[in-house]
Image: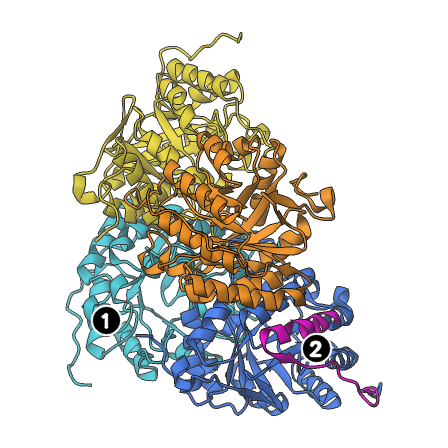
Chain colours: A cyan, B blue, C yellow, D orange
Amino acid sequence: MSTYKLVHRPENSGGTIVRVGNVEIGGGEFVVAAGPCAIESREQILETAALVTAAGARLLRGGAFKPRTSPYSFQGLGLKGLELLEEAGVATDTPTVTEVLTPEDIPAVAQSADALQVGARNMQNFALLKALGSAEKPVLLKRGLSSTIEEFLLAAEYIIAHGNPNVVLCERGIRTFETATRNTLDLGAVALLKNITHLPVFVDPSHGTGRRELVAPMARAAAAAGADGLIIEVHPNPDQALCDGPQSLTPPQFAGLMSSLRALLPALGRTVAAPQKRSRPVTFATGA
Amino acid sequence: MSTYKLVHRPENSGGTIVRVGNVEIGGGEFVVAAGPCAIESREQILETAALVTAAGARLLRGGAFKPRTSPYSFQGLGLKGLELLEEAGVATDTPTVTEVLTPEDIPAVAQSADALQVGARNMQNFALLKALGSAEKPVLLKRGLSSTIEEFLLAAEYIIAHGNPNVVLCERGIRTFETATRNTLDLGAVALLKNITHLPVFVDPSHGTGRRELVAPMARAAAAAGADGLIIEVHPNPDQALCDGPQSLTPPQFAGLMSSLRALLPALGRTVAAPQKRSRPVTFATGA
Amino acid sequence: MSTYKLVHRPENSGGTIVRVGNVEIGGGEFVVAAGPCAIESREQILETAALVTAAGARLLRGGAFKPRTSPYSFQGLGLKGLELLEEAGVATDTPTVTEVLTPEDIPAVAQSADALQVGARNMQNFALLKALGSAEKPVLLKRGLSSTIEEFLLAAEYIIAHGNPNVVLCERGIRTFETATRNTLDLGAVALLKNITHLPVFVDPSHGTGRRELVAPMARAAAAAGADGLIIEVHPNPDQALCDGPQSLTPPQFAGLMSSLRALLPALGRTVAAPQKRSRPVTFATGA
Amino acid sequence: MSTYKLVHRPENSGGTIVRVGNVEIGGGEFVVAAGPCAIESREQILETAALVTAAGARLLRGGAFKPRTSPYSFQGLGLKGLELLEEAGVATDTPTVTEVLTPEDIPAVAQSADALQVGARNMQNFALLKALGSAEKPVLLKRGLSSTIEEFLLAAEYIIAHGNPNVVLCERGIRTFETATRNTLDLGAVALLKNITHLPVFVDPSHGTGRRELVAPMARAAAAAGADGLIIEVHPNPDQALCDGPQSLTPPQFAGLMSSLRALLPALGRTVAAPQKRSRPVTFATGA
């Protein structure tokens, strides 16, 4: 007897499809979300948005409220960051996903973004999970650093039991004794989750490895393990990123990864978005 | 160069004393907090309070807002639980400590209890930490299940940097591969923290082991490792506890532990409270 | 400055090819080794050998000397097992790999098998590693349950520094807090090893997951992460296996996995063996 | 139903006493073994032996065969080291304990030393465990870096089932995510082992913390958790030690630790050796 109910695969044996804007997660298309760790400026997010969507990203990610280990680290642009992400999403016609840290921020974030991310450190912030049950946007729930698969599913169960069935799980690496990688990406958990639950499963190989050179092979491995999509950190100039530079791809590296996924996914019975040819470039005024 | 500033030992090399009501933590007295995991009823908390304080507990613990892994588990009595804890504290003339889960609950909890506990799963709930910076009560900060000592100290740094210098750290066991105990109580962390920081350090051997029969030896080991006090789960009838029964001591077991601590602490250069002889029993009306 | 020398990628930047019998590991072909955890009987190993090689396995595995956690578990057939494995290898014209537990067993095992396996629990049995430096057969070195990547590479360095350059590394899952899978298969380590060292890297998804239903997706994920091959447990009747039944594939499941690898590998720029059509069945007398 | 038999507490509910030379482990006396990580020279081991025994050490430790992570690290003096340790033991009238790495070294080590140590990396070297079943000296079995308590007990079960009942278990820290200490000393395991098994339990706070300043508090904590003794690394000049310098105590630090143990142990109902007053100093010729 399992301790979870609503997330259990037999509840929806065909698999749940979660819609983020016009994008379907959990269906035949393998969906890639991309963007910077933190929204740093209008230019940065708009440029990144243009480049990652051109390469085939179907969702745009970027952090406005940043949970940082040290109180002295950059904490994100907050509401201003939300506005910039929304502008970038509109400019590229791409749904957005961003993190929410507290129940009281949910209304503003849900108004502005197309999906709400729960970070690893908040996976068992039960007040937040309960409040997300009332949100009208889907939730991307990241696995906690030391959360078991059972705890991960029960966190999703909180959100669903409180009214919101649109949850995408995201494996992002667990904490182990190994220090050569930032975390240990647990792709066995992905394969197991696909058996246990009907919810879609994403993978974050950026946090899962912490090393830029490992992101592409682990992205492909995630696809092969059965993931429904990826969330990838991309920065136009990783060396100057205010957060997570060492694990961020450059836009050309991201385009290369997308190209290799287009070669790989058909062999796994799935599709992935083609590069986007725009009739005109994404333009944006240089004023604030 | 350390990444933390305010918690660093040289900031207060003599060691910080945190006052919870009339009790001093971090001084010459080894302080024991005790009480049930969850406040379940008026009788339960009043009876437990009377028994643990008679045995020498100087602080009363009890959960009103419970963070539970499953949405289907008992979530605590909430505000009603707060009232009962306050009543028990008054009845036994003992300061109280209870967990707070969200920034919006802080005012009510700080009004009612003498110290605010941050649970392991919220150790990196940065919105909560920041809000506790403005609270006018001391904070008992539990180490996260997979938090490094550096992350633990930086969580304390958040609270202090936001205005509240009264933080007691609490080692409560970390998550490892070992399953014979609920967690692995990291007493080496206690010894190390006493070197690095001026903040007092508590130990929770109840969660740290998850097994009643190990609580007393690990409580003594914590004292020998240099801890400033303990937080212990005690329930009048552990087999019927709504939470954490297997790791809860019975009141007689708790009294036995206190007795052994009184034998031990002088050899470590510290004192611990004597059993309390009341002129009259703690009485309480049976009505609501 | 790295702490290892001979295993470092610049020592052989094109990558080392290790030959096991007539099979090359580390080249363009993705190599699959398969067979039972333990050799149990002549019929069992010959039947398994016939079936896995027909499905495309290029190496035959099987344990004669078994390191078991309990002294009361089946410890393997020993020298008799070695003979049976050799017979099965000859009958199917397939090189064999089997575990060696002590320096004194090396001559007999190296005489009989085509590659010598060092199990996870012996990865830092330095006397064994040194003795393998003098062995005239290649070594399949499994990563220890809690060994860092650096320790893993230094174990290989021991073998090479003592004279034997033919080492294949094998990621087989590490021990973490997660209990839903037997181990946590660390495919990020595979991608990282391919960057750091010139040695070929195998993956063992059987031990890496401990669950039969996860072996195929993790085998594909290993290929996508850049592994040079796999080692897979296959048993004609897993429910009656004397060891590791729950993680053993049936022969039809193994054939299905091979088929899916043949669909996948070309998209990763590699080949994998076709199913083997024999002119005549592998036959064997029923006597001892 | 437990998976172990001979180590189970009911097999000898009063607790097993293991004799190493004239020293009893597991009785009323708390026994401290001390000495250098590696035997480096005649002067070093004789000087250390004289100093630690004067301070109250009842056993002398020192490594002759050293298992080292890198093949390029000092591997110990081997047989010459054994001779020097024996000489130091005779000179100070103190039984000795040293590590054995392979079955073939057992006769020489058992001839020379009074107890045979199995290191953490060999805890599941089953060939070694079986061979120790025939040894005529007691075994100090260290817990593996990532061994569960059950695996630890089954390793002891191997030795006993093969004929040698004289096994002392030794908790020496497990591998976790925490990097501030070398290992995480699991004193909860000590308390649990004392419940489960009749075998004596030692603690190694030197490896358990990896930091000199934490050795004394964790040594005291081990005593309070119920350990039967300690094994401590002491070096006359830790900064120049060929191995484990950062975790080695100086002789005066060791004497201070022993003094604090003499204050503590009576409060725990045990005794510990007084400092040894010799009628004449331990002298040794300066020739080789």
- Does mark 2 fall on the same chain as mark 1? no
Q: Which of A176/A97 is in front?
A: A176
Q: Which residue in the structure is indicated by mark 1? A: A241
The Cα–Cα distance between marks 1 and 2, rounded to whole angstroms, is: 47 Å
Q: Which residues are magenta?
A: B256-284
Q: Position of residue A50 (x, y in %)?
A: 21, 68
Asked if residue B267 is among those painted magenta in the image, a careful observer would answer yes
Residue type, numbered disc 2: Ile
Left or right placement of residue D230 versus residue C128 in this view:
right
**Image height check: is B224 above or below A188?**
below
Looking at the picture, does residue D251 appear above or below residue C150? below
Q: Residue at x 25, y 34 (%)?
A: C26
Residue at image point 69% right, 63% down? D269
Please name the residue that numbered disc 2 is placed on: B39
- Quadrant containing the C terminus of chain B is bottom right
User: The residue tagged with tag 1: helix, strand or loop?
Assistant: loop
Q: Residues within 10 Å of mark 2 (few under 14, many from 20)?
A: many
Q: Chain of mark 1?
A: A
Residue A265 appears in the figure:
no
Q: Mark 1 and 2 residues: CB-CB less than 8 Å, in contact?
A: no
